């Protein structure tokens, strides 16, 4: 467990005005936190991810106090499970692909990737164990978010956690991606953002072939697997059509817009306007974070497949969660006129890890896509209201509307 003495020391990352000595101390403390948790907890158990380090870093960026950081840490511990090791030498360079998709081998993969990263360095490790296999859509692409976070903050342990998470949640959808056109054939096309999102919010919403709730085994990934199996040809057709509409950068931007819009679509405000329900998988930042992570770290020659995979991931999430309606005329009263006010309200009302990441995802969108700031502020107001007494709905708000 994280030592309280470590947690109570100030730490930070990415502070431009800090002296080199201050940055070194801050980075050292962050590494202490990472090291103490590295071999303790699984990255995910039944849809509950281990986001301890990301939550602490994001809270610190928001200006949280040391007391708030400690409280948030205790909240994250409620959702994690201890790592199980079967045989630390079971996975090696020859057989590492034999255990893909088996969550029980997370600890073994973690030990393996710790050793490989130490021996090979980052680039060679990614070449051998990430780029060498078809892209995975496992666990809603959150392993990619973890990988981008580890690379951004130069945290080797976070990188190996991400690779272990990626391999144990592995879900191969290459047969769908291979059906898409050669990117050269659509490099000069540039459909409007509205046209790109019409496929998701209008056509798929109205397509009766997607009717019927997909239960799975009470986990999101099991439901996605059933959807991929039962609607394979239909999904393939939609992804192929979407892939031809514009260049990769335009489609990435459209996906960011879609993911941000889905916050509003996947929310439900009670009649007394004092209580907000939010969809667990559509409104907690995963789709935005995955899109921005792929934009951040993916090598150009792999980007096209990953952009198409992002759309497939968004499509599957939207369908599994019940295809909530896009009410374009829905407006809420803006209590907060800026993000600083929203931040203060959220920090005061709630340190819910999922809410923290949902909110900071919006801030990243405003940094990279300033023209979405108005939409993001609207959503941030909703999250501020949610922070008072909101409820996460795991089963999908689209099924209850």
Image (tube, rainbow, N blue to C red):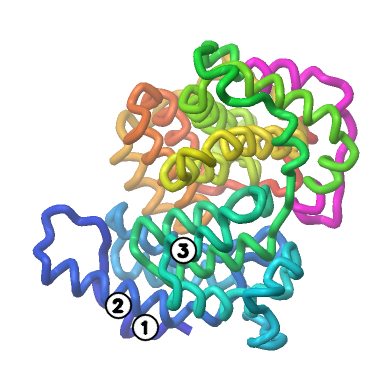
Q: Position of residue 380 (x, y in %)?
A: 43, 36
Labels 1, 3: front one: 3
Secondary structure under the numbered disc 3 in the rendered image: helix
Q: Are marks 2 and 3 in contact (CB under 8 Å)?
A: no
Cβ–Cβ below 8 Å for labels 1 and 2? yes
Q: Is residue 348 above or below residue 257?
A: below
Could you say which is closer to the camera, residue 9 or residue 44? Answer: 44
Q: Can residue 204 be found in the magenta stretch?
A: yes
Q: Nearer the viewer, residue 300 or 258?
A: 300
In the image: residue 116, left or right of residue 271: left
Is residue 384 visible to us here?
no
Q: Nearer the viewer, residue 351 or 149?
A: 149
**Magenta stretch bounds:** 198-223
Residue pointed to by mark 2: 8
Q: Note whether 283 is above or below 256 in the view shown.
A: below
Residue 290 is situated, as x and y percent measured from the top left of the image, at 53, 45
The answer to whether residue 138 is magenta is no
- Residue position marked by numbered label 1 in the rendering: 4
Query: In the figure, is residue 245 to the left or right of 7?
Result: right
Disc 3 designates what residue?
A: 124
Residue 41, horizontal then vertical, whole percent: 58, 76
Structural distance between the alpha carbons of marks 1 and 2: 6 Å
* Residue 260 is at least partly visible in this image: yes
Which numbered disc, 2 or 3, marks the residue that appears first in the sequence? Answer: 2
The picture places residue 188, in percent across and down from the top left corner, at: 50, 13
Q: In the rendered view, tell whether residue 68 sits above or below residue 298.
A: below
The local secondary structure at tag 1 comes to helix
């Amino acid at each position: 467990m994280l030592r309280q003495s470590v947690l109570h020391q100030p730490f930070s990352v990415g502070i431009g005005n800090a002296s080199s000595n201050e940055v070194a101390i801050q980075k050292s403390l962050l590494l202490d936190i990472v090291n103490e948790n590295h071999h303790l907890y699984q990255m995910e158990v039944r849809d509950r991810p281990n986001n301890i380090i990301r939550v602490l870093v994001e809270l610190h960026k928001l200006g949280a106090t040391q007391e708030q950081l400690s409280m948030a840490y205790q909240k994250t511990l409620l959702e994690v499970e201890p790592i199980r090791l079967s045989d630390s030498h079971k996975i090696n360079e020859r057989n590492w692909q034999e255990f893909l998709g088996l969550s029980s081998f997370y600890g073994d993969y973690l030990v393996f990737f710790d050793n490989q990263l130490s021996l090979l360095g980052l680039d060679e490790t990614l070449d051998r164990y990430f780029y060498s296999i078809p892209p995975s859509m496992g666990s809603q692409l959150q392993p990619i978010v973890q990988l981008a976070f580890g690379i951004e903050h130069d945290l080797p342990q976070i990188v190996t956690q991400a690779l272990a998470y990626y391999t144990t949640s592995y879900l191969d959808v290459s047969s769908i991606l291979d059906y898409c056109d050669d990117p050269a054939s659509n490099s000069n096309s540039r459909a409007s953002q509205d046209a790109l999102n019409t496929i998701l919010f209008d056509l798929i919403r109205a397509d009766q072939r997607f009717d019927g709730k997909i239960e799975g085994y009470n986990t999101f990934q099991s439901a996605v697997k059933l959807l991929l199996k039962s609607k394979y040809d239909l999904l393939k057709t939609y992804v192929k059509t979407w892939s031809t509409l514009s260049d990769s950068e335009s489609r990435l931007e459209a996906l960011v817009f879609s993911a941000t819009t889905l916050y509003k679509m996947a929310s439900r405000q009670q009649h007394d306007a004092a209580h907000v329900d939010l969809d667990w998988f559509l409104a907690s930042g995963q789709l935005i974070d995955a899109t921005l992570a792929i934009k951040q770290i993916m090598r150009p020659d792999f980007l096209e497949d990953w952009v198409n995979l992002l759309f497939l991931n968004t499509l599957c999430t939207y369908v599994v969660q019940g295809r909530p309606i896009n009410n374009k005329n829905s407006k809420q009263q803006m209590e907060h006129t800026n993000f600083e006010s929203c931040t203060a309200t959220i920090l005061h009302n709630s340190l819910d890890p999922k809410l923290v990441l949902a909110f900071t995802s919006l801030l990243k969108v405003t940094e990279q896509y300033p023209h979405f700031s108005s939409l993001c502020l609207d959503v941030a107001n909703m999250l501020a209201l949610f922070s008072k007494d909101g409820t996460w709905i795991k089963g999908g708000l689209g099924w209850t509307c």
